[in-house]
Image (spheres, helix red, strand yellow):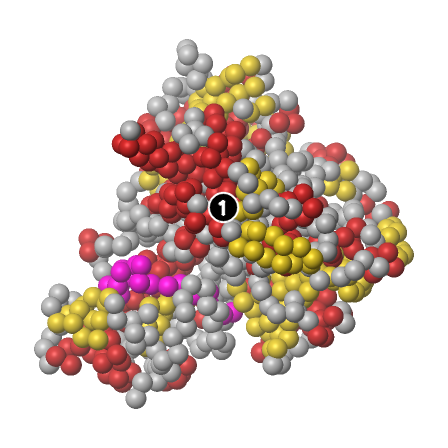
Amino acid sequence: MIQSRREFLTTARNGLLLGIMGESVTSFAASVDQDPEFSPSNFLSISPSGAVRVFVGQGEMGQDIFSGLAMLVAEELNTPLDEVAVVAAPVSPAFGNSFFPGSPQMTAASSSIKVFYIPYRNAGAAARQMLETAVSTMLDKSVNRILLTNGEVVCDDNDRIPLKLVMPILADLPIPDSLKLKEPSEFQVIGNPQRSIGVEKKVNGTLGYGMDVKVPGAMTAVVAHPPSFGAQITHFDSSTALAIPGVLEVLRIPTGIAVIGENYWVADSGKKALDIDWDESAGQNLSTEGILETYRELASKPGQAFTFNPIPGMDYQLKPSLGPDEYAQHNGAVTIESEFIAPYLAHAPMEPLNCTIFEKDGLIHVHTGTHYQFADKDAVVKTLGVDSSRVKLHTLPMGGSFGRRACPKSDWITEAAQIFKLAQTARTNPIKLVWSREDDITGGWYRPLVLSKVSAALNQDGTIGSWAQRIVGQPAIDHETLSFIGPENIDLTTVDAVGNLVYDIQDKVVDVHHTENLVPVQWMRSVGHSHNVFFVETFMNELADEAGVDQVTFRLNHAKDDRVKRVLQLAAEKGQWNGGLSSDGKAHGVSVHEFYGTYVANMAEVIQVAENKFKIVKIVFGVDLGTVINPDAVRAQMESGAVLALSSTLYGEIDIDRGMPKQSNFDTYRPLRFNQCPDIETHIVSSDLPPTGAGETGVPSVAPAVCNAIAKLRGEYLRALPIAKQGIEIV
Amino acid sequence: MVRKMVINNEEYVLDAPDDMPLLWVLRDILELTGTKFGCGKAQCGACTVLINDSPARSCVTPLSAVAHQEITTIEGLANLPESSLQYAWVEHNVPQCGYCQSGQLMSAAALLRQHPNPTDAEIDQGMSGNICRCGTYPRIKKAIKSVSTISSDVSSDSV
């Protein structure tokens, strides 16, 4: 007898199984086959008709992880990739991400491929080996190679057996104790560029994002949020709003005043008609200027020293050091010091945040685009005070995130749960919470504002003798939610790319001042690297120039390993590095960094068009990610990182005055536009090392490379972002 | 008020106020959700549709302004000659998150109607009103160029 998947899983006895699916799946791409399925793993099921479904717990936000993991299964299973569908998995420990302490279901730190490379290949290999055993039994001969296609098992390129006939035998087979994975030389899928699975739905408008959830009777909720951080409601009048036809309910919730209407436009009209008195005293003294003043003062005092190595894979460990001043005294070196600033940044994904929530048959359904399902489900459970088994979170494709849709406090999902809990309308109708762009850009959860003071002792032979870096800012990680904190009470991501410099400098001191204020912050794509690589790599140029050494050579002289050197040489070679400035006015800037095992170098070419007016001609990446699964996805992510980083480099800033962000929409929070986009080249190092991630790795190197090139033309270093604020225009 | 509208060559009868933006009529009343909400003030282009032959930001276009106009949304693009853009988008694997792509494609369709073989400057001008935060601009440019090259090949063949 063929068992259902659940029975199969509960009776399976192999360590391959990580857990039992407690919930049915939400279909993303495939139609659900009702017949009993063959499922040798939580990651994979095959229907009798041959429909192969790969279950993915990681969130899809455009980084193409769905295709990446499907490729791993297709490779080992021997099935054409275009016959594989990917389905968003339920929230379950079976889909936990072991990169993080406690293995929460979450997509971050470009860890998905690194963590799931072997497990998804194992799933495909188990299925293939069981199919081989089953057809060998049926044919009464040894079958060495199978291909699963069109619902048939093709045996040794010869016999074709309908999968339907194989299923009864499969059901009685044990999951193999040992799995034989392919050698890299046997790869047919891995390493070849593949088009994104489901791309067709993105060009005909049919892909269903959270914003597009269609549930009968759903009413739209919008929220009037505080105009400044910390503002409290003292009084509100909802009568004008309620007089608008289609406005159903106005209610106070912890985060503001919610207005529920028959559609977004009506609800938003109701929100605009609200009369709310706010007490804004809490944020009156909160301004970017004031924060920077405090940070500068802190930067003049020693902070909490950073010396530890708390998480495997994050190789941060500092030795006792003298520091640049003392080192210089002993060694006759000169010291240099600079101060750097990176502002608050809003992620501003194209799809504004939203969440649909309703109760049906005793279950509370939550539909949203997220990549931190573990925390989000928990937030709903706690907000509603219900048993976890009653909450069903459906992970939807995201219209961008850049980290925003993995909020440590699940802010927008918690808000939807509050409305669901408090609104009368929610007793009869599903609620769809929709944020405006203004809610998004003024609503906080920004990349932290960071100030850093860096100093170094430069030996007379042009080598760096000692490096000291002080970093001042709010921790990007909420440690109540994700224990990412070390014994010295420092948020690891704050020292990203500094604790583990890509340069071999024996004498190194890193310390941190963690600050607090009313502005809620969280990680943004590439996290601490997003500011620290700008600081480090700009300072490296200052040191190279002081030493009178070519900026590429200076980096090569200090590189900690061959992988750093290789990507730097690759970018310099492909970008035709000219030493910094050629006689025909082409300025070049370089940078290099490592992001959790992925090595990236960058060479930017910039020309001057008029005074303080520049054109970025090209961005050339050299990248080493070990084994590459999908080269086209890598290229896409580098292009993506470059464009996001260019937006931040040129314009990105949330500037706060009297507790209020000055930016509110894309007119004031400007992104890079089509006409400003440079050519972007990606050159990938060929490697058989284990794969690392791509998604965030394109971001960090861009600001320093571009700013270093502009510095050549302007004659002064750019030490603060964004550069438009310093009168620089990019055409 | 109750009115008739023709969208993608299909007739719809609906009841909505004059000042309701076309975007929300499409999305919340007609359930044509391919057209996206991104900013609400004509800054990002995610809501771009064709009104007759011109691109329009549906988030700031009141219903009263489109009476008796021919409206095409992403759902109708496949029936236009410019559907070649959709194939080119797939061929060049353009989308990442994909959310802005309906608007990008409708702007590109309008561009090709005006300039069947656009220059780089014309592509820049036609596409600079559409934001992509994922950074698909270089691939969009390649995809548009591939379509315009095909069309010019076809026209030169037929001469």
Q: Residue at x 23, y 79 (%)?
A: A166
Q: Residue at x 36, y 31 (%)?
A: A571
Q: Is residue A154 left or right of residue A728?
A: left
Q: Residue at x 68, y 71 (%)?
A: A429
Q: Nearer the viewer, residue A690 or A490?
A: A690
- Give the percent coordinates (x, y) of residue A369: 55, 59
Residue A58 magenta-drawn?
Answer: no
Q: Nearer the viewer, residue A633 or A41?
A: A633
- Give the percent coordinates (x, y) of residue A203: 45, 49
- Give the percent coordinates (x, y) of residue A228: 78, 46
Q: Residue at x 15, y 81 (%)?
A: A138
Q: Nearer the viewer, residue A705 or A40?
A: A40
Amino acid found under the numbered disc labelled 1: Gln
**SS at mark 1 in the image:** helix
Q: Nearer the viewer, residue A447 or A277?
A: A277
- Give the percent coordinates (x, y) of residue B88: 37, 43
Decide: is B43 above or below A324.
below
**Magenta range:** A74-91
- Report which residue position mark 1 lands on: B101
Work out which quarter of the rendered image holds the N terminus of chain B and state it.
bottom right
